[in-house]
């Protein structure tokens, strides 16, 4: 039986996930701002309004959250870092994700971020969750194609 949990993220969760971050996520960090997975996750934990860890049978498979886009206004920046295990248990987490996005929208009525055009799994998840993905355009330090994605509370 699968024991899936979403819990408040801690520094220990981040330390556990860092060596197992998906290659697609690492490539996305490199293309966006050149940061390491450790830096992205530590920044996410520090700056996010809420930050959660997704666990399967006690093992961290994802860390995600939403950070304020600015100190004024109602825009949030949703983010997610996963392991290859996340794809194996995607249905388990997808069933819970819509509630998480609804919680994000209750704090930030407008969510937006960018996703690497090469990250097909992430794009499929975002589409399934109801985000709008724009056509890819150059973005980040490497100028690679990224999709801006967004969702607005109705």
Image: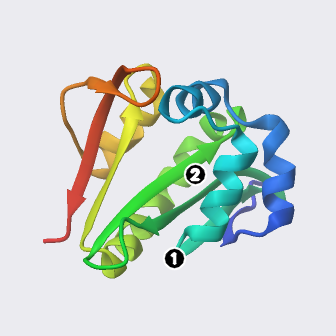
Mark 2 neighbour density, 10 Å: few (under 14) some (14–19) many (20 or more): some
Residue sitting at x 59%, y 24%: 27
Residue 139: image quadrant is top left
Q: Which of marks 2 and 1 precedes in the sequence?
A: 1
Task: State the CA–CA distance, disc 1 to disc 2.
Answer: 24 Å
Q: Secondary structure at mark 1?
A: loop
**Which residue, given by chain and number where applicable, does mark 2 sit on?**
92
Instruction: Label 2, secondary structure: give it.
Output: helix
Identify the residue at image location x=24%, y=73%: 109
Residue sitting nearer the eye, 76 or 91: 76
Q: Where is 31 relative to 102, above or below? A: above
Q: Quadrant of residue 22?
A: top right
Q: Is residue 62 above or below residue 96?
A: above
Q: From the image, which quarter does the N terminus lie in?
A: bottom right
Could you say which is closer to the camera, residue 153 or residue 2?
153
From the top left corner, tell me how far across and down residue 111 is, in percent.
30, 61
Q: Visible in this render: residue 69?
A: yes
Q: Position of residue 79 (x, y in %)?
A: 49, 53
Query: In terms of depth relative to the viewer, which is nearer, 118 or 97?
Result: 118
116 relative to 25 in the view: left or right: left
Residue 59, numbered circle: none
Label 1: few (<14), some or many (≥20) within 10 Å? some
Residue 57 in sight: no
Mark closer to the observer (1, 2) = 1
């Amino acid at each position: 039986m699968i024991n899936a949990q979403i819990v408040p993220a801690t520094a220990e969760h981040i330390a556990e996930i860092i060596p197992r971050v998906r290659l697609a996520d690492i490539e996305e960090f490199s293309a966006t701002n050149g940061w390491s997975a450790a830096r992205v996750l530590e920044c996410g934990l520090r700056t996010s309004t809420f930050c959660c860890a997704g666990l399967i049978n006690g093992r961290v498979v994802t860390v995600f959250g939403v950070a304020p886009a600015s100190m004024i206004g109602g825009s949030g920046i949703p983010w997610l870092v996963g392991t290859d295990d996340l794809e194996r248990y995607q249905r388990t987490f997808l069933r819970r994700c819509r509630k998480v996005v609804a919680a994000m929208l209750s704090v930030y009525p407008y969510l937006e971020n960018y996703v690497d055009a090469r990250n097909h799994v992430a794009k499929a998840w975002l589409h399934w969750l109801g985000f709008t993905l724009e056509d890819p355009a150059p973005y980040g330090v490497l100028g690679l194609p990224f999709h801006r994605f967004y969702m607005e509370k109705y």
